[in-house]
Amino acid sequence: MIGGMHDRDWAALAADIKVWGRELGFDAVGISGTDLGAAEAGLDAWLAAGCHGGMDYMASHGTKRSRPAELVPGTRSIVIARMNYLPDAADANACLADGSRASVSRYALGRDYHKLLRARLQKLADRIAAEVGEFGHRVFTDSAPVMEGAIAAQAGLGWRGKHTLLLSREAGSWFFLGEIYTELPLPADAAITDHCGTCTACLDACPTQAIVAPGRVDARRCISYLTIELKGPIPEELRPLLGNHIYGCDDCQLCCPWNREAPKTREPDFAPRHGLDQAGLTTLFAWSEAEFYERLAGSPIRRIGHERWLRNIAVALGNAPTSQTVIDALASRRDHASELVREHVAWALARHGIDPA
């Protein structure tokens, strides 16, 4: 516990924290209280409807996700920071329109953000400690059950769009979030008004109709879930709807009016690597397991493993325009050691009129 708790100007400290955060490369910093009651009710309803699919971890932590002081005892305020990640990359819509190319979510084109954000947040925590003395805190970047979207909305960093992502008038939705749970009694910032209005662009654009209602996504239909979180076979009825998405999906962000003027990232680590912003499907499908792990070292994509990488690309090749190149690529994996890969390759070959036997 820090000393002089009652003598400090906490509003002034909160203002300083925002300045220090920007000096460390964050694009915005806000402060939230710990009452997430409304968000907890929404989470409970979402879980009860089974919208989390196979993400059992969404339910396994009980109320720790929505009650910060249960996750980190003593938490009184939350510092939450935003960092833009939109890279200077090949046009995403042009990639989606070319069925021979692979569509990779913008956030995954460069290096993994987890370590970078966590290190910056720890530097911010250290800067706070230099000012107030050692204090109880814990830093998070997708590393624990944290309702970061709800927290960021309460801290005034944006509002929850109909696609459930946080939206900012200044930055759109192309940004990462990270948090510092603290024992400090920092004054919370005010939430801001929802500016989606009557727009339904994200609902209309979702290829699998995963946005089942404004503010609710059924993960079981979401392409990001299907290509990243799902460990088993992708449901056959959804495969044609995946198009050329092989890792994640940005369709609901690409169509959002608030993203038209979204700023590019200032962080070099988020720049595309290995040409992933414009790579051909057959090129990526040919990567051996060793090449996959070597070339994607430091990438968030690496976590899905080579087997699911091939599963995803096989589906995209099944949706690609028929050509001998596509058929030959699929045939080269027809006898792959993985049953998961073989089944998706057989499906894809059948899409091109080739007997998979």
Image (spheres, rainbow, N blue to C red):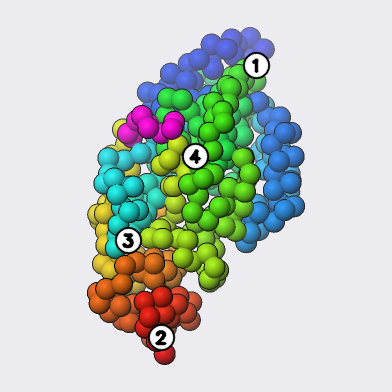
Going from N to C along the chain, the mark reached first, 2 or 4, is 4
The local crowd at label 1, few if under 14, some if 14 to 19, many if 20 or more residues have their Cα within 10 Å, is: few
* Location of the N terminus (image quadrant): top right
Residue type at mark 4: give it.
Ala
Dividing the picture into quadrants, the one containing residue 341 is bottom left
Secondary structure found at label 3: loop
Q: Which residue is mark 3?
A: 99
Residue 118 at x, y percent in the picture: 46, 40
The answer to which of marks 3 and 4 sits earlier in the sequence is 3
Say which label, 1 or 3, has the lower sequence index.
1
| Magenta stretch bounds | 257-265
Q: What residue do we see at 29% from left, 63% from top?
A: 100
* Residue 345 spot, x, y in % from top left: 41, 77
Magenta includes 262?
yes
**Which one is closest to the eye, mark 1 or mark 4?**
4
**Front residue of 170 and 187:** 170
Q: Is residue 76 above or below residue 347?
A: above
Please tell me whether mark 1 sits on a helix, a strand or a loop.
loop
Q: Main secondary structure of the magenta part?
A: loop
Of the numbered discs 1 and 4, the one sitting upstream in the chain is 1
Q: Describe residue 283's horizontal placement relative to residue 24 as left or right.
A: left
Does the magenta portion include 279? no
Work out whether residue 97 or residue 68 is closer to the camera in this orientation and state it: 97
Mark number displayed over residue 5 = 1
Q: In terms of image quadrants, where is residue 325? A: bottom left
According to the image, label 4 marks what residue? 201
